[in-house]
Amino acid sequence: MRCSTGSARRPGRTWAAARLLDRYRAASIGKEQFFGAPMYVVSLSGWPAAEMRPEEPVVATGGARIALWRTDPADQRRVPDPGASGVLYTSATFSLVNSGNRTKYAPKRSWKVDVEPGDDDDRIVGMARLNLKSMYNDPSQMREGLAWALFRRAGVPAARHTYARLAINDGYQGLYSLIEQVDRAFLRERFGANNRGNLYKMYCGDVGCATLERRVGTDGDDSGRQYFTPGHPDLTYRLKTNEDDRSANGYDDLAQFIRVINGVGRPGGGERFNTDSYRAAVEGILNVRAFLRWAGLNLLLGSWDNYFATPANYYLYNSGRRGAAKQFMATPYFTFIPWDYDNCLGIDYFDTRWQYTDLLDWPDNTRSYHGGKGTSRIPLVQNLLANHDFAQYYLDHLEHMLDTDFTTAAFRARMGTPDGPGLWQRVIPSAYLEADFPNSPPFTGRQFTNDEVYRGGYVQQELRHANAFVLGIHHYVRMRYASAREQLAILRKTYPAGASGAQFTGTVESVPQ
Protein backbone atom coordinates (compact mmCIF):
# COMPACT_ATOMS: atom_id res chain seq x y z
CA MET A 1 0.00 0.00 0.00
CA ARG A 2 1.65 3.17 -1.25
CA CYS A 3 1.94 6.21 1.01
CA SER A 4 3.38 9.65 0.47
CA THR A 5 4.49 12.57 2.59
CA GLY A 6 1.47 14.40 3.91
CA SER A 7 -0.99 11.69 2.91
CA ALA A 8 -1.77 8.03 3.39
CA ARG A 9 -4.01 5.52 1.77
CA ARG A 10 -7.34 5.24 3.51
CA PRO A 11 -7.03 2.54 6.20
CA GLY A 12 -10.53 1.07 6.00
CA ARG A 13 -12.74 3.36 8.04
CA THR A 14 -10.24 4.40 10.70
CA TRP A 15 -9.86 8.17 11.00
CA ALA A 16 -7.73 10.38 13.17
CA ALA A 17 -9.19 11.71 16.39
CA ALA A 18 -8.48 15.17 15.02
CA ARG A 19 -11.83 15.01 13.18
CA LEU A 20 -13.51 15.74 16.52
CA LEU A 21 -12.07 19.23 16.35
CA ASP A 22 -13.70 20.00 13.00
CA ARG A 23 -16.79 22.15 12.99
CA TYR A 24 -19.74 21.90 10.66
CA ARG A 25 -20.66 25.44 9.67
CA ALA A 26 -24.04 24.90 8.04
CA ALA A 27 -26.11 22.82 10.46
CA SER A 28 -29.27 24.77 9.66
CA ILE A 29 -28.97 24.43 5.86
CA GLY A 30 -30.92 21.70 4.11
CA LYS A 31 -29.93 20.04 0.86
CA GLU A 32 -32.43 21.99 -1.19
CA GLN A 33 -30.96 25.25 0.03
CA PHE A 34 -27.40 23.97 -0.38
CA PHE A 35 -27.92 22.93 -4.00
CA GLY A 36 -29.97 26.04 -4.65
CA ALA A 37 -26.82 28.14 -4.35
CA PRO A 38 -25.45 28.86 -7.84
CA MET A 39 -21.73 28.43 -7.15
CA TYR A 40 -19.26 27.23 -4.51
CA VAL A 41 -15.52 27.23 -4.07
CA VAL A 42 -14.07 23.90 -2.97
CA SER A 43 -10.54 24.59 -1.75
CA LEU A 44 -7.97 21.94 -0.79
CA SER A 45 -4.88 23.30 0.94
CA GLY A 46 -1.71 21.56 2.03
CA TRP A 47 -2.24 18.76 -0.49
CA PRO A 48 0.96 16.92 -1.53
CA ALA A 49 2.06 17.54 -5.11
CA ALA A 50 2.79 13.82 -5.52
CA GLU A 51 -0.92 13.00 -5.11
CA MET A 52 -2.49 15.15 -7.84
CA ARG A 53 -3.58 12.07 -9.78
CA PRO A 54 -4.82 9.61 -7.11
CA GLU A 55 -6.31 6.47 -8.67
CA GLU A 56 -7.15 5.14 -5.20
CA PRO A 57 -8.46 7.16 -2.23
CA VAL A 58 -5.74 9.12 -0.46
CA VAL A 59 -6.38 10.20 3.12
CA ALA A 60 -5.30 13.71 4.05
CA THR A 61 -2.68 14.10 6.77
CA GLY A 62 0.10 16.53 7.53
CA GLY A 63 -2.03 19.65 7.69
CA ALA A 64 -4.08 19.18 4.51
CA ARG A 65 -7.54 20.72 4.78
CA ILE A 66 -10.70 21.08 2.76
CA ALA A 67 -12.87 24.21 2.89
CA LEU A 68 -16.07 25.09 1.07
CA TRP A 69 -17.87 28.42 0.68
CA ARG A 70 -20.39 30.14 -1.54
CA THR A 71 -19.27 32.53 -4.23
CA ASP A 72 -20.73 34.72 -6.95
CA PRO A 73 -20.58 33.02 -10.38
CA ALA A 74 -19.73 36.40 -11.93
CA ASP A 75 -16.64 36.93 -9.78
CA GLN A 76 -13.66 37.49 -12.08
CA ARG A 77 -11.14 36.05 -9.62
CA ARG A 78 -10.24 32.44 -10.22
CA VAL A 79 -10.41 31.56 -6.51
CA PRO A 80 -12.53 34.16 -4.71
CA ASP A 81 -12.09 34.38 -0.95
CA PRO A 82 -14.95 33.43 1.40
CA GLY A 83 -16.12 37.01 1.72
CA ALA A 84 -18.77 38.13 4.19
CA SER A 85 -20.65 34.81 4.16
CA GLY A 86 -17.59 32.99 5.53
CA VAL A 87 -16.56 29.37 5.22
CA LEU A 88 -19.53 27.03 5.13
CA TYR A 89 -17.56 23.89 5.96
CA THR A 90 -13.96 23.00 6.77
CA SER A 91 -12.23 19.81 7.85
CA ALA A 92 -8.83 18.17 8.04
CA THR A 93 -10.50 14.75 7.78
CA PHE A 94 -11.11 13.78 4.18
CA SER A 95 -9.87 11.62 1.33
CA LEU A 96 -9.47 12.34 -2.35
CA VAL A 97 -9.60 10.18 -5.50
CA ASN A 98 -10.08 10.66 -9.24
CA SER A 99 -13.29 9.17 -10.60
CA GLY A 100 -15.22 8.38 -13.74
CA ASN A 101 -14.63 6.22 -16.78
CA ARG A 102 -13.44 8.59 -19.48
CA THR A 103 -12.46 11.30 -17.03
CA LYS A 104 -10.49 9.19 -14.55
CA TYR A 105 -7.41 9.48 -16.76
CA ALA A 106 -8.32 12.62 -18.71
CA PRO A 107 -6.17 15.76 -18.46
CA LYS A 108 -9.00 17.41 -16.52
CA ARG A 109 -10.20 14.74 -14.15
CA SER A 110 -13.29 14.30 -12.03
CA TRP A 111 -12.91 13.98 -8.26
CA LYS A 112 -14.58 12.39 -5.28
CA VAL A 113 -13.97 13.96 -1.89
CA ASP A 114 -15.01 11.81 1.08
CA VAL A 115 -15.35 13.89 4.22
CA GLU A 116 -16.60 11.25 6.66
CA PRO A 117 -15.85 7.59 7.32
CA GLY A 118 -19.46 6.50 7.66
CA ASP A 119 -22.77 7.01 5.91
CA ASP A 120 -24.66 8.31 8.91
CA ASP A 121 -22.59 11.22 10.19
CA ASP A 122 -23.98 14.58 9.17
CA ARG A 123 -21.27 16.66 7.57
CA ILE A 124 -22.09 18.78 4.53
CA VAL A 125 -25.88 18.82 4.82
CA GLY A 126 -25.75 15.12 5.54
CA MET A 127 -23.41 14.30 2.66
CA ALA A 128 -20.32 12.23 3.25
CA ARG A 129 -19.04 12.81 -0.31
CA LEU A 130 -18.62 15.62 -2.81
CA ASN A 131 -18.87 14.53 -6.45
CA LEU A 132 -16.98 17.00 -8.61
CA LYS A 133 -17.56 16.18 -12.29
CA SER A 134 -15.17 17.79 -14.78
CA MET A 135 -17.72 17.92 -17.65
CA TYR A 136 -14.79 16.93 -19.88
CA ASN A 137 -17.02 15.83 -22.77
CA ASP A 138 -19.32 18.85 -22.71
CA PRO A 139 -18.25 22.14 -24.33
CA SER A 140 -21.42 23.86 -23.11
CA GLN A 141 -20.72 22.98 -19.45
CA MET A 142 -24.52 22.82 -19.03
CA ARG A 143 -25.70 19.35 -20.03
CA GLU A 144 -25.62 17.79 -16.57
CA GLY A 145 -27.34 20.79 -15.05
CA LEU A 146 -30.11 20.57 -17.64
CA ALA A 147 -30.58 16.80 -17.27
CA TRP A 148 -30.73 16.67 -13.47
CA ALA A 149 -33.22 19.53 -13.32
CA LEU A 150 -35.49 17.76 -15.82
CA PHE A 151 -35.50 14.52 -13.85
CA ARG A 152 -36.49 16.31 -10.68
CA ARG A 153 -39.25 18.19 -12.51
CA ALA A 154 -40.52 14.85 -13.82
CA GLY A 155 -40.72 13.30 -10.34
CA VAL A 156 -37.81 10.90 -10.89
CA PRO A 157 -35.77 10.22 -7.70
CA ALA A 158 -32.52 11.80 -8.83
CA ALA A 159 -29.50 13.66 -7.53
CA ARG A 160 -29.38 17.42 -7.15
CA HIS A 161 -26.85 19.55 -9.01
CA THR A 162 -25.00 22.84 -8.72
CA TYR A 163 -21.55 24.18 -9.69
CA ALA A 164 -18.21 24.64 -7.97
CA ARG A 165 -14.79 26.09 -8.68
CA LEU A 166 -12.09 23.69 -7.50
CA ALA A 167 -8.77 24.94 -6.11
CA ILE A 168 -5.90 22.75 -4.95
CA ASN A 169 -3.09 24.51 -3.08
CA ASP A 170 -4.44 27.83 -4.41
CA GLY A 171 -4.14 26.58 -7.99
CA TYR A 172 -7.37 26.91 -10.01
CA GLN A 173 -8.47 23.52 -11.34
CA GLY A 174 -11.54 24.80 -13.17
CA LEU A 175 -15.32 24.68 -13.20
CA TYR A 176 -17.01 21.48 -12.01
CA SER A 177 -20.49 20.08 -11.62
CA LEU A 178 -21.19 19.40 -7.95
CA ILE A 179 -23.59 16.46 -7.81
CA GLU A 180 -25.39 14.98 -4.82
CA GLN A 181 -24.14 11.55 -3.83
CA VAL A 182 -26.56 8.61 -3.81
CA ASP A 183 -25.85 7.29 -0.31
CA ARG A 184 -27.58 6.67 3.00
CA ALA A 185 -28.37 10.37 3.43
CA PHE A 186 -29.95 10.40 -0.04
CA LEU A 187 -32.01 7.34 0.89
CA ARG A 188 -33.15 8.81 4.22
CA GLU A 189 -34.51 11.88 2.49
CA ARG A 190 -36.28 10.00 -0.32
CA PHE A 191 -37.43 6.88 1.50
CA GLY A 192 -37.79 7.90 5.14
CA ALA A 193 -37.84 4.94 7.50
CA ASN A 194 -37.17 2.65 4.53
CA ASN A 195 -33.55 3.82 4.22
CA ARG A 196 -31.84 0.63 5.41
CA GLY A 197 -32.39 -1.50 2.32
CA ASN A 198 -30.03 -2.72 -0.38
CA LEU A 199 -28.55 -0.11 -2.73
CA TYR A 200 -26.94 -1.54 -5.87
CA LYS A 201 -24.79 0.44 -8.28
CA MET A 202 -24.34 -0.98 -11.75
CA TYR A 203 -21.13 -1.30 -13.76
CA CYS A 204 -19.50 -3.46 -16.42
CA GLY A 205 -17.55 -6.02 -14.43
CA ASP A 206 -17.25 -9.63 -13.40
CA VAL A 207 -20.43 -10.86 -15.09
CA GLY A 208 -20.42 -8.41 -17.98
CA CYS A 209 -22.50 -5.24 -18.05
CA ALA A 210 -25.56 -4.71 -15.87
CA THR A 211 -28.19 -5.84 -18.36
CA LEU A 212 -30.57 -7.30 -15.73
CA GLU A 213 -30.80 -10.46 -17.80
CA ARG A 214 -31.49 -13.65 -15.86
CA ARG A 215 -28.41 -15.70 -15.03
CA VAL A 216 -28.70 -19.45 -14.44
CA GLY A 217 -25.98 -21.79 -13.20
CA THR A 218 -25.25 -25.19 -14.73
CA ASP A 219 -27.30 -26.75 -11.93
CA GLY A 220 -30.31 -24.55 -12.75
CA ASP A 221 -29.66 -22.22 -9.84
CA ASP A 222 -30.75 -18.61 -10.47
CA SER A 223 -30.31 -17.28 -6.95
CA GLY A 224 -28.36 -14.19 -6.00
CA ARG A 225 -25.01 -15.93 -6.13
CA GLN A 226 -25.23 -15.91 -9.93
CA TYR A 227 -24.84 -12.12 -9.95
CA PHE A 228 -21.53 -11.64 -8.16
CA THR A 229 -18.18 -13.34 -7.75
CA PRO A 230 -17.11 -13.42 -4.07
CA GLY A 231 -13.95 -11.41 -3.55
CA HIS A 232 -13.88 -10.06 -7.11
CA PRO A 233 -12.53 -6.50 -7.22
CA ASP A 234 -14.68 -5.41 -10.16
CA LEU A 235 -18.29 -6.45 -9.60
CA THR A 236 -21.02 -5.72 -12.13
CA TYR A 237 -23.77 -5.44 -9.51
CA ARG A 238 -22.13 -3.73 -6.52
CA LEU A 239 -23.88 -3.58 -3.18
CA LYS A 240 -23.26 -0.16 -1.64
CA THR A 241 -25.10 -0.75 1.64
CA ASN A 242 -25.38 -3.70 4.04
CA GLU A 243 -22.08 -5.09 2.78
CA ASP A 244 -21.43 -6.78 6.13
CA ASP A 245 -24.96 -8.08 6.69
CA ARG A 246 -25.03 -11.76 5.73
CA SER A 247 -28.81 -11.82 5.70
CA ALA A 248 -28.91 -9.02 3.11
CA ASN A 249 -25.75 -9.27 1.02
CA GLY A 250 -26.49 -12.47 -0.88
CA TYR A 251 -28.16 -10.64 -3.80
CA ASP A 252 -31.27 -12.82 -3.55
CA ASP A 253 -33.51 -9.74 -3.69
CA LEU A 254 -31.85 -8.69 -6.95
CA ALA A 255 -32.28 -12.20 -8.33
CA GLN A 256 -35.98 -12.12 -7.46
CA PHE A 257 -36.35 -8.73 -9.14
CA ILE A 258 -34.66 -10.02 -12.29
CA ARG A 259 -36.90 -13.10 -12.38
CA VAL A 260 -40.02 -10.95 -12.15
CA ILE A 261 -39.10 -8.42 -14.84
CA ASN A 262 -38.09 -11.25 -17.18
CA GLY A 263 -41.38 -13.06 -16.66
CA VAL A 264 -39.73 -16.24 -15.45
CA GLY A 265 -42.23 -19.09 -15.04
CA ARG A 266 -44.98 -17.32 -16.97
CA PRO A 267 -46.49 -19.09 -20.00
CA GLY A 268 -46.97 -17.48 -23.37
CA GLY A 269 -43.50 -16.85 -24.73
CA GLY A 270 -42.98 -13.22 -25.75
CA GLU A 271 -46.68 -12.52 -25.24
CA ARG A 272 -46.37 -13.14 -21.51
CA PHE A 273 -45.25 -9.54 -21.01
CA ASN A 274 -48.49 -8.10 -22.37
CA THR A 275 -50.70 -9.56 -19.65
CA ASP A 276 -52.41 -8.20 -16.57
CA SER A 277 -50.62 -10.75 -14.40
CA TYR A 278 -47.18 -9.62 -15.62
CA ARG A 279 -48.13 -5.98 -15.08
CA ALA A 280 -49.30 -6.73 -11.53
CA ALA A 281 -46.15 -8.71 -10.72
CA VAL A 282 -43.84 -5.92 -11.89
CA GLU A 283 -45.86 -3.27 -10.07
CA GLY A 284 -45.46 -5.37 -6.93
CA ILE A 285 -41.67 -5.18 -7.00
CA LEU A 286 -40.80 -1.92 -8.84
CA ASN A 287 -41.86 1.72 -8.80
CA VAL A 288 -42.88 1.31 -12.41
CA ARG A 289 -44.20 4.78 -13.06
CA ALA A 290 -41.07 6.53 -11.85
CA PHE A 291 -39.00 4.17 -13.99
CA LEU A 292 -41.12 4.79 -17.09
CA ARG A 293 -40.88 8.55 -16.57
CA TRP A 294 -37.10 8.16 -16.38
CA ALA A 295 -37.16 6.02 -19.52
CA GLY A 296 -39.04 8.53 -21.65
CA LEU A 297 -36.95 11.45 -20.51
CA ASN A 298 -33.68 9.52 -20.88
CA LEU A 299 -34.60 8.67 -24.45
CA LEU A 300 -35.42 12.30 -25.22
CA LEU A 301 -32.10 13.39 -23.71
CA GLY A 302 -30.26 10.85 -25.87
CA SER A 303 -28.24 9.69 -22.89
CA TRP A 304 -26.70 6.39 -23.95
CA ASP A 305 -24.03 5.60 -21.32
CA ASN A 306 -26.50 4.09 -18.84
CA TYR A 307 -29.31 1.51 -19.00
CA PHE A 308 -29.53 2.08 -22.73
CA ALA A 309 -26.43 1.31 -24.76
CA THR A 310 -23.79 0.30 -22.21
CA PRO A 311 -25.75 -0.74 -19.96
CA ALA A 312 -24.35 0.46 -16.61
CA ASN A 313 -24.16 3.68 -14.59
CA TYR A 314 -27.42 3.50 -12.65
CA TYR A 315 -28.66 2.44 -9.23
CA LEU A 316 -31.38 0.10 -8.01
CA TYR A 317 -32.60 0.53 -4.46
CA ASN A 318 -34.61 -2.10 -2.61
CA SER A 319 -36.41 -0.15 0.10
CA GLY A 320 -38.87 -2.84 1.08
CA ARG A 321 -42.46 -1.93 1.88
CA ARG A 322 -43.69 0.91 4.04
CA GLY A 323 -44.32 -0.38 7.55
CA ALA A 324 -42.11 -3.41 6.93
CA ALA A 325 -38.73 -1.80 6.28
CA LYS A 326 -36.77 -4.58 7.97
CA GLN A 327 -38.40 -7.21 5.74
CA PHE A 328 -36.92 -5.78 2.53
CA MET A 329 -35.35 -9.11 1.62
CA ALA A 330 -38.60 -11.02 2.07
CA THR A 331 -40.77 -8.43 0.29
CA PRO A 332 -38.44 -6.41 -1.97
CA TYR A 333 -39.57 -3.21 -3.63
CA PHE A 334 -37.14 -1.51 -5.99
CA THR A 335 -36.70 2.03 -7.27
CA PHE A 336 -34.56 2.95 -10.27
CA ILE A 337 -32.18 5.86 -9.61
CA PRO A 338 -30.34 7.45 -12.56
CA TRP A 339 -26.68 8.44 -12.61
CA ASP A 340 -24.02 9.95 -14.89
CA TYR A 341 -25.32 12.49 -17.43
CA ASP A 342 -22.21 13.97 -18.99
CA ASN A 343 -22.96 12.21 -22.31
CA CYS A 344 -26.36 13.44 -23.44
CA LEU A 345 -28.11 16.03 -25.63
CA GLY A 346 -26.09 15.36 -28.76
CA ILE A 347 -22.73 13.99 -27.59
CA ASP A 348 -21.70 10.96 -29.65
CA TYR A 349 -18.60 8.79 -30.25
CA PHE A 350 -20.12 6.05 -32.43
CA ASP A 351 -21.57 7.74 -35.54
CA THR A 352 -25.02 7.23 -34.03
CA ARG A 353 -27.86 9.71 -34.37
CA TRP A 354 -29.31 9.28 -30.91
CA GLN A 355 -31.96 11.92 -31.63
CA TYR A 356 -33.73 9.48 -33.96
CA THR A 357 -33.92 6.46 -31.63
CA ASP A 358 -37.21 4.60 -31.96
CA LEU A 359 -39.48 5.39 -29.01
CA LEU A 360 -40.27 1.74 -28.35
CA ASP A 361 -37.26 -0.08 -29.82
CA TRP A 362 -34.19 1.39 -28.13
CA PRO A 363 -31.73 -1.43 -28.94
CA ASP A 364 -32.14 -0.99 -32.69
CA ASN A 365 -30.11 2.23 -32.49
CA THR A 366 -27.20 0.69 -30.56
CA ARG A 367 -25.65 -1.37 -33.36
CA SER A 368 -22.80 1.05 -34.02
CA TYR A 369 -22.15 1.36 -30.30
CA HIS A 370 -21.64 -2.40 -30.15
CA GLY A 371 -19.40 -2.44 -33.23
CA GLY A 372 -22.03 -4.06 -35.44
CA LYS A 373 -21.86 -7.25 -33.36
CA GLY A 374 -25.30 -6.97 -31.82
CA THR A 375 -27.49 -4.59 -29.88
CA SER A 376 -28.11 -3.68 -26.27
CA ARG A 377 -29.93 -6.23 -24.14
CA ILE A 378 -32.06 -4.22 -21.73
CA PRO A 379 -35.04 -6.32 -20.61
CA LEU A 380 -36.21 -3.79 -18.03
CA VAL A 381 -37.01 -1.46 -20.95
CA GLN A 382 -37.87 -4.01 -23.62
CA ASN A 383 -40.15 -6.21 -21.53
CA LEU A 384 -41.99 -3.36 -19.84
CA LEU A 385 -42.64 -1.58 -23.13
CA ALA A 386 -44.02 -4.85 -24.52
CA ASN A 387 -46.86 -4.42 -22.01
CA HIS A 388 -49.61 -2.22 -23.49
CA ASP A 389 -50.50 -0.48 -20.24
CA PHE A 390 -46.88 0.33 -19.40
CA ALA A 391 -46.21 1.56 -22.95
CA GLN A 392 -49.35 3.71 -22.79
CA TYR A 393 -48.19 5.45 -19.61
CA TYR A 394 -44.65 5.83 -20.99
CA LEU A 395 -45.86 7.45 -24.22
CA ASP A 396 -48.34 9.71 -22.42
CA HIS A 397 -45.60 11.00 -20.15
CA LEU A 398 -43.18 11.38 -23.03
CA GLU A 399 -45.74 13.50 -24.87
CA HIS A 400 -46.33 15.51 -21.70
CA MET A 401 -42.62 16.33 -21.70
CA LEU A 402 -42.84 17.39 -25.35
CA ASP A 403 -45.75 19.65 -24.45
CA THR A 404 -43.95 21.25 -21.52
CA ASP A 405 -40.24 20.89 -20.72
CA PHE A 406 -38.68 19.30 -23.79
CA THR A 407 -38.92 22.12 -26.30
CA THR A 408 -36.31 24.45 -27.76
CA ALA A 409 -38.04 27.39 -26.07
CA ALA A 410 -37.88 25.70 -22.65
CA PHE A 411 -34.21 24.87 -23.13
CA ARG A 412 -33.39 28.40 -24.23
CA ALA A 413 -35.08 29.75 -21.12
CA ARG A 414 -33.09 27.45 -18.82
CA MET A 415 -29.79 28.02 -20.57
CA GLY A 416 -30.17 31.79 -20.74
CA THR A 417 -28.00 34.26 -22.65
CA PRO A 418 -25.03 36.50 -21.83
CA ASP A 419 -27.54 39.21 -20.97
CA GLY A 420 -30.18 37.15 -19.20
CA PRO A 421 -30.47 34.66 -16.33
CA GLY A 422 -29.81 30.97 -16.84
CA LEU A 423 -27.13 28.33 -16.70
CA TRP A 424 -24.92 30.20 -19.16
CA GLN A 425 -24.57 33.07 -16.73
CA ARG A 426 -23.58 30.61 -14.01
CA VAL A 427 -20.85 28.81 -15.94
CA ILE A 428 -19.29 31.98 -17.39
CA PRO A 429 -16.76 33.36 -16.36
CA SER A 430 -15.73 30.26 -14.34
CA ALA A 431 -15.23 28.30 -17.56
CA TYR A 432 -13.43 31.15 -19.32
CA LEU A 433 -11.02 31.48 -16.40
CA GLU A 434 -9.58 28.07 -17.30
CA ALA A 435 -7.60 29.59 -20.20
CA ASP A 436 -5.69 32.81 -20.76
CA PHE A 437 -6.85 33.40 -24.34
CA PRO A 438 -9.88 32.40 -26.46
CA ASN A 439 -8.01 29.81 -28.56
CA SER A 440 -5.23 28.76 -26.18
CA PRO A 441 -5.29 25.30 -24.56
CA PRO A 442 -6.93 25.54 -21.12
CA PHE A 443 -4.30 25.14 -18.38
CA THR A 444 -6.79 23.01 -16.41
CA GLY A 445 -6.71 20.26 -19.06
CA ARG A 446 -10.23 20.87 -20.34
CA GLN A 447 -10.31 19.67 -23.95
CA PHE A 448 -12.32 22.60 -25.29
CA THR A 449 -10.92 26.10 -25.75
CA ASN A 450 -12.83 29.12 -24.52
CA ASP A 451 -13.81 29.85 -28.10
CA GLU A 452 -15.24 26.34 -28.42
CA VAL A 453 -17.10 26.74 -25.13
CA TYR A 454 -18.65 29.89 -26.56
CA ARG A 455 -19.45 28.31 -29.91
CA GLY A 456 -20.76 25.07 -28.40
CA GLY A 457 -22.60 26.55 -25.42
CA TYR A 458 -23.93 29.87 -26.67
CA VAL A 459 -23.74 29.99 -30.48
CA GLN A 460 -24.84 26.31 -30.58
CA GLN A 461 -22.44 25.19 -33.26
CA GLU A 462 -21.44 21.59 -33.83
CA LEU A 463 -17.94 20.58 -32.71
CA ARG A 464 -15.72 17.59 -33.49
CA HIS A 465 -12.72 16.34 -31.51
CA ALA A 466 -11.22 13.11 -32.87
CA ASN A 467 -14.07 10.55 -32.71
CA ALA A 468 -16.28 12.83 -30.59
CA PHE A 469 -19.06 14.75 -32.33
CA VAL A 470 -21.07 17.26 -30.31
CA LEU A 471 -24.28 18.78 -31.60
CA GLY A 472 -25.48 22.13 -30.37
CA ILE A 473 -28.05 21.51 -27.63
CA HIS A 474 -30.75 23.53 -29.38
CA HIS A 475 -30.11 21.66 -32.64
CA TYR A 476 -30.30 18.28 -30.90
CA VAL A 477 -33.52 19.18 -29.06
CA ARG A 478 -35.15 20.41 -32.25
CA MET A 479 -34.37 17.17 -34.10
CA ARG A 480 -35.32 14.89 -31.18
CA TYR A 481 -38.57 16.80 -30.69
CA ALA A 482 -39.53 16.52 -34.38
CA SER A 483 -38.69 12.82 -34.56
CA ALA A 484 -40.60 12.03 -31.37
CA ARG A 485 -43.68 13.91 -32.59
CA GLU A 486 -43.57 12.07 -35.92
CA GLN A 487 -43.31 8.68 -34.23
CA LEU A 488 -46.06 9.51 -31.74
CA ALA A 489 -48.46 10.40 -34.54
CA ILE A 490 -48.16 6.82 -35.79
CA LEU A 491 -48.15 5.15 -32.37
CA ARG A 492 -51.29 6.98 -31.27
CA LYS A 493 -53.33 4.62 -33.45
CA THR A 494 -52.44 1.86 -30.98
CA TYR A 495 -51.88 3.99 -27.86
CA PRO A 496 -54.49 6.80 -27.92
CA ALA A 497 -53.34 10.06 -26.38
CA GLY A 498 -54.16 10.28 -22.68
CA ALA A 499 -55.56 6.73 -22.46
CA SER A 500 -53.44 6.01 -19.38
CA GLY A 501 -55.50 8.58 -17.48
CA ALA A 502 -52.37 9.68 -15.64
CA GLN A 503 -51.87 13.15 -14.22
CA PHE A 504 -48.20 14.10 -14.24
CA THR A 505 -47.64 16.06 -11.06
CA GLY A 506 -43.85 15.95 -10.89
CA THR A 507 -43.81 14.13 -7.54
CA VAL A 508 -42.25 10.80 -6.72
CA GLU A 509 -44.60 8.03 -5.59
CA SER A 510 -44.42 6.98 -1.96
CA VAL A 511 -43.12 3.56 -1.01
CA PRO A 512 -46.27 1.38 -0.91
CA GLN A 513 -47.45 -0.50 2.15
Image (cartoon, rainbow, N blue to C red):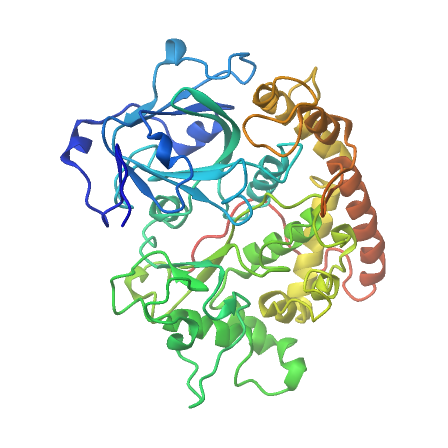
- Across and down, in percent, residue 380 comes to 58, 67
Q: Is residue 44 above or below residue 365?
A: above
The percent position of residue 110, horizontal first and vertical second, equals 49, 39
- Asked whether the viewer can see residue 457, the reply is yes
The image position of residue 298, as x and y in percent, is 64, 51
Q: Position of residue 158 (x, y in %)?
A: 50, 46
Q: Residue furthest top?
A: 84
Left or right relative to 8: residue 472:
right
In the picture, measured across the screen, residue 305 lies left or right of residue 510, that is right
Considering depth in this image, is 474 or 138 the residue closer to the camera? 138
Residue drawn at (72%, 44%) of the image: 466
Q: Name, please, the residue furthest toward the left.
A: 17
Position of 90 compared to 294: left or right? left
Q: Quadrant of the C terminus?
A: bottom left
Total residue callouts: 0
Residue at the extreme bottom = 219
Residue pictured at 29% horizontal, 61% vertical: 243
In the image, residue 242 sits, relative to residue 263, either above or below, namely above
Above/below status of 172 relative to 284: above
Left or right position of 198 against 262? left
Q: Is residue 27 visible?
A: no
Which of these two is toward me, 174 or 263?
A: 174
Q: Residue at x 63, y 76 (%)?
A: 273
